[in-house]
Amino acid sequence: MNEEKINKIIDHGNIPGHVAIIMDGNGRWAKNRGLLRVAGHHEGINSVREIVKLSSRLGIEILTLYTFSSENWKRPETEVSALMQLLLKTIRAEVEDLHNNNVKVVSIGQLEDLPESPRLGIHEAIVKTKNNTGLILNLALSYSSRYEILSAVQEIALKVKNDDLEVDQISEEIFSEYLNTCSMRDPDLLIRTSGESRISNFLLWQIAYTEIYFTETLWPSFREKEFLEAIENYQNRERRFGQVSEQVH
């Protein structure tokens, strides 16, 4: 690690408490090298490992990774199967190290959609690390923000129908309690790799005031240098939340 640069970032302050990442570009990384797409997914794991360690070092509280979207089930069956096997292999290989480094693993999305083995593997990691107090590693699996919002609306509507909640009691805070991320702060910084400039059905409610950082770097090549650049970029921004600059200062 570049300790000098890391210390400079830490000394500057204004570290994002919650960083969310859309990890895009695995397939293109592999294609550019004449490899099968799954090779990009394998190399992407090394990026995950490095970014998790850096996040802990910087004192980031929550790292949310868009690991597998609900739309990803539409990919070729062979690729989906390989991704599920890789997910199981990775979580089993990494959980001990994560636990020893005080990382707490959690998950959002429709975990029940996953095949039994990876689903149980994720559950075991969540249980093993549940009492850890360091970085929260939040894995978005079979996740769809539209589905999450729709489910929240349905739950609230049922509460109103059963007279457990009054319509005029529904606020942004109440609505947020019905989202997958109810126990988390909203992301301060959203990073998307690979040069694409879209959100892809990810944390649509939660990123209302999130700073967004797009990079051309493909995810398997996104490592310490690129992550620190994103953090530095965030540190130099002024977050006004609808106010004018003079009010903020």
Image (cartoon, rainbow, N blue to C red):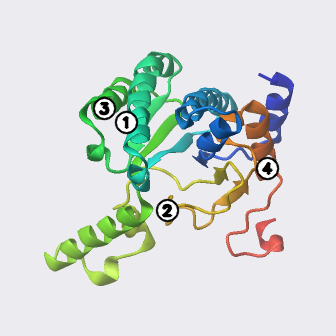
In the rendered view, would you say 97 is above or below 181?
A: above
Q: Is residue 130 visible to us here?
A: no
Name the residue tied to disc 2.
201
Name the residue tied to disc 3.
123
Structural distance between the alpha carbons of marks 2 and 1: 22 Å
Contact (CB < 8 A) between labels 4 and 2?
no
Structural distance between the alpha carbons of marks 4 and 2: 26 Å
Query: Which of marks 2 and 4 precedes in the sequence?
Result: 2
Contact (CB < 8 A) between labels 4 and 3?
no
59 sits to left or right of 131? right
Kind of residue indicated by mark 2: Asn
218 sits to left or right of 182? right
Mark 1 neighbour class, 10 Å CA radius: few under 14, some 14 to 19, many 20 or more: some
Name the residue tied to disc 1.
81
Kind of residue indicated by mark 1: Ser
Query: Which of marks 4 and 1 precedes in the sequence?
Result: 1
Viewer-proximal residue, 6 or 148? 148
Viewer-proximal residue, 215 or 79? 79
